[in-house]
Image: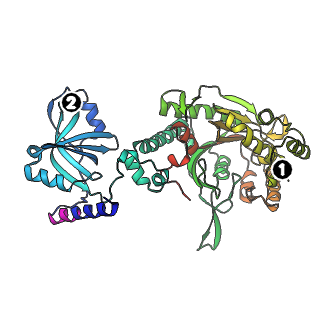
Amino acid sequence: MPELELIAVRREKLARLREKGINPYPYAFSRTHTAEDLRKSFGGLPPAQHTGVQVSVAGRVMALRRMGRATFADLHDRTGRIQLFANPQTLGPENYEFWLDVLDIGDIVGARGEVFTTKTGELSVAVSELVLLAKSLRPLPEKWHGLRDVETRYRERALDLVANPKAREILIKRAKILRTIRNYLDERGFIEVETPILQPVPGGASARPFITHHNELDRDLYLRIAPELYLKRLLVGGLEKVYEIGRNFRNEGISSEHNPEFTALEAYEAYTDYQGMMELAEGLIEACVLAVAGTTRLEYQGRWIDFSRPWRRVPLLELVAETSGCDVEKPLPELLRELERRGIPIPEHLKAGPKGKVIEHLLETYAEKTLWDPTFVLDYPLDISPLAKRKRDRPDLTERFELFIAGREVANAFSELNDPEEQRERFLAQEKLRAQGDEEAHRIDEDFIRDLELGMPPAGGIGIGIDRLTMILTDSPSIREVLAFPLLR
């Protein structure tokens, strides 16, 4: 039957319920047990066992099977499935036939009755009272457990979550990852803070911002691209260990790894450096892996990842030279000539420099996908790291690392630059790049520099992409799988 006709039939049933004086959308229902509660309390019962225990359960009807003078239903709640059993004796003949006539797969119901096991040993509730809690007017897809069209799943996310238990499980694991992160940091003396999402100057990352307008103030504001500069102000203010988990917004492309709004953790600790952030990242992510998988080895897209510590550490220049075959220590003009001789294409807009952008492109093109087990890539060029301290023995590089897992960047961290005069020089260099057309270059933030002039302690800071980490820990090929409501084209 076409969907519109099915909806019409369900609306007719809705009208009949109301004519009979039944509210198809009541206010509440007193539930005593979930499906998981029943399994824990009665899971070991032998077949054909009656307990005499009365319970109340509630959930969505996902299957109906009429077998002679009895009917079985699969009731799903957030913890799993429990079987309902009804016949004319448990519900009464007239009531039984009425509910059989008006009940549909997808309806949300409450049921009261005795816990028992069938002859085959199936744990069930013998329904003596049935209450409709929400009439479903739209039918679930045929073979509801097989909703596989990716476009439909992402555009009709509520339907996807109803139809696909795995989609719900991913969001449950995501919540477990967030809870683990908070517990890990809280136990180590970090405090969770909140910083502005609407910012007068977007900073803390290389990205194009979203622009909005405040009518009362009559000024443009920006959705934050990162909370970094505000979190560093808190270090200035004496909060020595801080973190924030929140949304960032970047006016960029959409792909299997990118969403314009995404969730990130940023954490800052006074009196440490990027070495301390490596130790923090190892411990924190290992805790998340153990919370989700119970082991430090898990499978992602058919390949195993080993999270056992310590993780590999490799300098960026060494890695790029090894994977591209190019001498990236050469000056930019010579490097570009070598790339041309080797037939390695470089986007035209990168050829004007800075050189760090070319090295970064080579990293993304040749090295990233080779980094499967967790790998810290260390010491990035100064010209693409305006917020990081110079490397102690190589002033043209910075004490910065990116963490790669399963061929994608998951974290970015620095020994944080706390010299206000050098920070101003770095910002001015970025402004020159903006003037040359680089829309992602940092803007100068005078308020931030003013606060740095009060004195910020030496510190390490790290940002971790929660969405990408969740993708890896839930074996999800696309970022859309780990977002409750991804943005679509």
Identify the magenta region: 14-20
Q: Is residue 78 visible?
A: yes
Q: Which residue is mark 1?
A: 354
Quadrant of res 316: top right
Image coords of residue 445 (percent x, y): 73, 58
The structure residue drawn at horizontal position 8% and vertical position 53%, both measured from the top left corner, is 94
**Which kind of residue does numbered mark 2 sit on?**
Thr
Does 168 lie within the magenta span? no
**Quadrant into which the C terminus falls:** bottom right
Task: Please determine whether, in this image, residue 255 is positioned above or below residue 403.
Answer: below
Image coords of residue 263 (percent x, y): 56, 49
Tell me the element at label 2: loop
Classify residue 81 as left or right of residue 185.
Answer: left
**Which kind of residue does numbered mark 1 sit on?**
Pro
In the drawing, what numbered circle is on residue 229? none
Q: Magenta region, mostly helix, strand or loop? A: helix
- Colour setting: rainbow
Q: Which residue is mark 2?
A: 120
* Mark 2 or 1, nearer chain start: 2
Task: Please determine whether, in this image, residue 388 is positioned above or below residue 292.
Answer: below
Classify residue 97 as left or right of residue 215.
Answer: left
